[in-house]
Image (cartoon, rainbow, N blue to C red):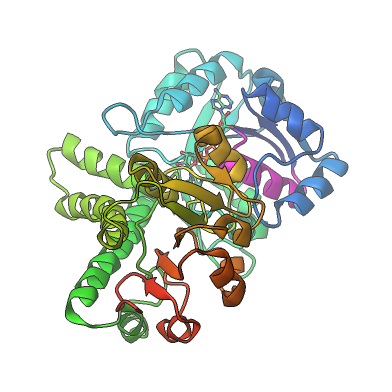
Amino acid sequence: MKIAVIGTGYVGLVTGTCFAETGNDVTCVDINSAKVDMLNRGEVPIFEPGLEVLFHRNTEKKRLHFTTDLAAAVSQATIIFLALPTPPGADGAADLSYVLGVAEELGKIITEYKVIVDKSTVPVGTADKVHAAVAKNAKVEFDIVSNPEFLREGVAVEDFLKPDRVVIGTSSEKATKLMEHLYEPFVRQGNPIIFMDERSAEMTKYAANAFLATKISFMNEIANLCERTGANVDMVRKGIGTDTRIGNRFLFPGVGYGGSCFPKDVQALFLTANEVTYNFRILDAVMQVNSLQRAIFFDKIKLKYPDLKGMKAAVWGLAFKPNTDDIREAPALYLIDQLLANGCEVSAYDPEAMAHVKQIYGDKITLAEEAYAACLDADFLIIATEWAEFRSPDFEQLSSNLKAKVIFDGRNIFSLDEMAVAGFYYESIGRSIVK
Ligand code: NAD
């Protein structure tokens, strides 16, 4: 099948590459010409495990192309995916200007039947708006499909190739058949394609993200309570995670959720509810708990070091989670801002995200070439992202590089026992302090 993917970011590039991998002819479009030039030079602009291999295989086989020319890409495609940004607008609701802007353009361009698929995360009712925007100028038949994307950055390729489920919202039989055919290679192991109406598909994406964010905020509250009652959240997590009704995933407390999806999607769903005069009380609490969780963690540092002026903090991990270079809404950035505001010097390290961080902070912080170098002469170490390479460090080298053996761990990557043996002062989340 011939496919166009509009928007070549984390979702669009993975989507386009994976559809090419199953034999389709895919053209990815982006307005960012520097990004398109990079892709045409054979360089992958994002870090995503497994993506490079697939990218090179499919560009070499000439099944995967990149362009800034929307009309050229669309004219040959039967299915057009919109993988455009839907960032929070000034009021916090999803900004649909990218999606609706391109939809209007599509109406002017299309000269034969097309399926226009919304892969961006969009509020309930957007399919109707996209339909109206295309219809304004279109002189031919077209269908709109809502096909929300559930991939997780860091395992995006695996998630796309072997999705738990594919959700397709459409009222068109013709579009249903085309979408079923397109996704058939991805659901061979019995994972379902769930067909539904457009509104339910749109709501499914927000409900999934809001539920996962709720799980995280709930566990963060349990962790805070554990600290005050002498319980250990690791034990509690294992104790409840073995209950199949609860499940053992997404029960890890930390410094709060970040990334380009959870914060904006929870907020957008809350505002969707407001628009229909429904007060979604749980989501309000989820957001409050999440922003407090970062502050609670920073307060631990302030309690030990009331005057951070002239001190130096090492920070391990800048990406909002491991295995990605994405720093959107990353808790590490909040912590760095607080440290700098308190006059504390910052020396940071991340395996993949430092180039993006450099763009924000310039010379205001030091970016080290490797993890131990970030700790040289630092008064303490903060762990903000649980990259695998941080999990089994050489504690002797760490001890000799740090000025004091002090770690604030926002991701609970070490056991209390190992920290006691290594002789560190160690504060984590929902567990007692090792002194
Ligand atoms: P992104 O910012 O990484 O990528 C968006 C791309 O669209 C950028 O490359 C940008 O240059 C391009 N673009 C903007 N306007 C354009 C236009 N008019 N024409 C062509 N290209 C244009 O965003 P993303 O993370 O890929 O997210 C895209 C959508 O998918 C969002 O709605 C997001 O909520 C949703 N989503 C994201 C994830 C994730 O993990 N990142 C997961 C599921 C769903």
Q: Who is closer to the viewer here, 50 or 120?
A: 50
Residue range in magenta is: 8-24
Q: Position of residue 149 (x, y in %)?
A: 50, 49
Q: Who is closer to the viewer here, 292 or 169?
A: 292
Query: What residue do we see at 71% from left, 57% from top?
Result: 50
Examine the structure image and report whether residue 383 is included in the region drawn in magenta.
no
Is residue 104 in view?
yes
Q: Position of residue 33 (x, y in %)?
A: 68, 22
Examine the structure image and report whether residue 17 is included in the region drawn in magenta.
yes
Q: Position of residue 126 (x, y in %)?
A: 37, 33
Left or right, 420 with respect to 181, comes to left
Q: Position of residue 223 (x, y in %)?
A: 27, 71
Query: What residue do we see at 60% from left, 55% from top?
Result: 160
Q: Who is closer to the viewer here, 369 or 216?
A: 369
Query: What residue do we see at 43% from left, 26% from top?
Result: 131
Left or right, 428 with respect to 157, comes to left
Is residue 392 in view?
no
Query: What residue do we see at 68% from left, 29% from top?
Result: 35
Decide: is 110 above or below 85. above
Q: Quadrant of residue 87?
A: top left
Q: Quadrant of the C terminus?
A: bottom left
Q: Quadrant of the N terminus?
A: top right
Left or right, 94 with respect to 137, comes to left
Decide: is 173 above or below 414. above
Q: Who is closer to the viewer here, 123 or 423?
A: 423
Taken as a whole, is the magenta stretch helix, strand or loop?
Answer: helix
Q: Quadrant of residue 162?
A: bottom right
